[in-house]
Each structure stands twice: as C-alpha cells, then as structure tokens.
C-alpha cells in the first residue's frame, strides 16, 4: 500500500455514496472520503446527480487526521488542471505528456455536473426524493444554528 501525501492527486474509484459524501478507493492502495462540499464547484444537493458507484475520478488528498482518515476533494483535483487521461499520467515526464497537458489547457476537458431536471419532467418518486433531501439539509442547518445560539456543540 502506498503512503498518501497531502496535496497530491491520485486516480480513484467511487466505492460508496452516502448523503454526506462519497467513499473512494485510491489506485495503489488506500481510501478516503470526498465530502459533499468537495464534489463540485457548484451547490450539490444530491450526490448521485454528480457521481455513480465504480466511476473513476481524480482526487486530491486535502487532509489526513490523527486516526488516519483521509479527506479527498474532486473539485480541487480539477482546479489544478490535471485532467489528462490516466494512462498518460503514469508515464512520467516525456515531452508528449507535456504537450498533452498544454493542449488540455487550451481546450480544457472539464467535468460538468448533470443538469437538474425541471419538476414538470420528474416522477413523483424523484420529487419526493428531492424534497426529502432538501428538507433534511434544512433541518441540519436549523439544528446547527440553534446549537450555536444555545452554546452547545454536537458530536
């Protein structure tokens, strides 16, 4: 298993999706979690609109806590302009690789989130799912702000 370094970008595969993030297995060993806020540069209300299980992604290690839990970011990996195909990445520093990166800067291969479907095209189950998600997020925000006002902390 390789030693993961904070600030480095790795190839990974989404292994699980929860309401607050996605778990990613990193190539060469190791795994970590991408928090919902680190998936895209836009607001993410439903992670499955942006990621699917077994999808290959580039992730940047943004933190490792004392317990060894690894925090990852997809949006910070994309910000570095590191969007060259995975096979080209492994080769190292030959000139063809540098040309490829230069070409990518001119016409970036930027990942874009799925467009949200308008309510008129949604099924009842989709509308209920979206309502449940936004309701849950609002309740969490409300509890958090209430706890701050009362001076209590949640664990």
Image (cartoon, rainbow, N blue to C red):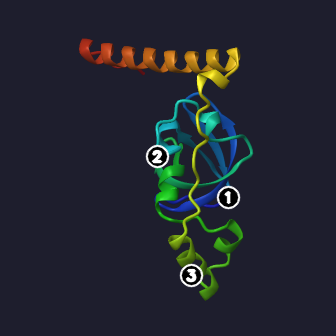
The C terminus, quarter of image: top left
Location of residue 124 in the rendering, given as x and y in whole percent from the top left corner:
69, 14
Q: Which residue is mark 1?
A: 1
Location of residue 144 in the rendering, given as x and y in whole percent from the top left corner:
36, 19
Location of residue 75 in the rendering, given as x and y in whole percent from the top left corner:
50, 51
Find the distance from the CA under tag 3 to the CA under tag 2. 26 Å
Who's the residue at 47% across and 54% down the image? 76
Q: Earlier in the sequence, mark 1 or mark 2?
A: 1
The N terminus, quarter of image: bottom right
Discs 1/2, front: 2
Q: Which residue is mark 3?
A: 98
Find the distance from the CA under tag 1 to the CA under tag 2. 31 Å
Dots 3, 2 in contact, CB < 8 A? no
Badge 1 crowding class, 10 Å Cα cut-off, few under 14, some 14 to 19, many 20 or more, is: few
Considering every residue shown, the one lying at the far right of the view is 54
Q: Which residue is mark 2?
A: 41
Q: Secondary structure at mark 1?
A: loop
Q: Earlier in the sequence, mark 1 or mark 3?
A: 1
Who's the residue at 74% across and 45% down the image? 54
Answer with left or right where residue 131 lies relative to residue 30.
left
Quarter of the rendering containing residue 47: top right
Quarter of the rendering containing residue 12: bottom right
Badge 2 crowding class, 10 Å Cα cut-off, few under 14, some 14 to 19, many 20 or more, is: some
Instruction: Please tell me which residue lies in front, 20 or 2.
Output: 20
């Amino acid at each position: 298993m390789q030693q993961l370094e904070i600030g480095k970008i790795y190839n990974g595969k989404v292994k699980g999706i929860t309401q607050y993030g996605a778990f990613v297995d990193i190539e060469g060993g190791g795994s970590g979690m991408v928090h919902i806020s680190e998936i895209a540069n836009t607001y993410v209300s439903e992670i499955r609109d942006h990621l699917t299980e077994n999808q290959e992604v580039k992730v940047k290690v943004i933190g490792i806590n004392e317990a060894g839990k690894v925090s990852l970011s997809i949006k910070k990996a994309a910000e570095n302009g590191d969007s060259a195909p995975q096979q080209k990445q492994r080769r190292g520093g030959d000139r063809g690789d540098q040309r490829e990166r230069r070409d990518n800067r001119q016409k970036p291969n930027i990942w874009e989130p799925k467009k949200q479907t308008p309510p008129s095209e949604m099924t009842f189950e989709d509308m209920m799912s979206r309502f449940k998600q936004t309701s849950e997020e609002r309740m969490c925000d409300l509890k958090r702000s209430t706890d701050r006002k009362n001076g209590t902390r949640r664990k």
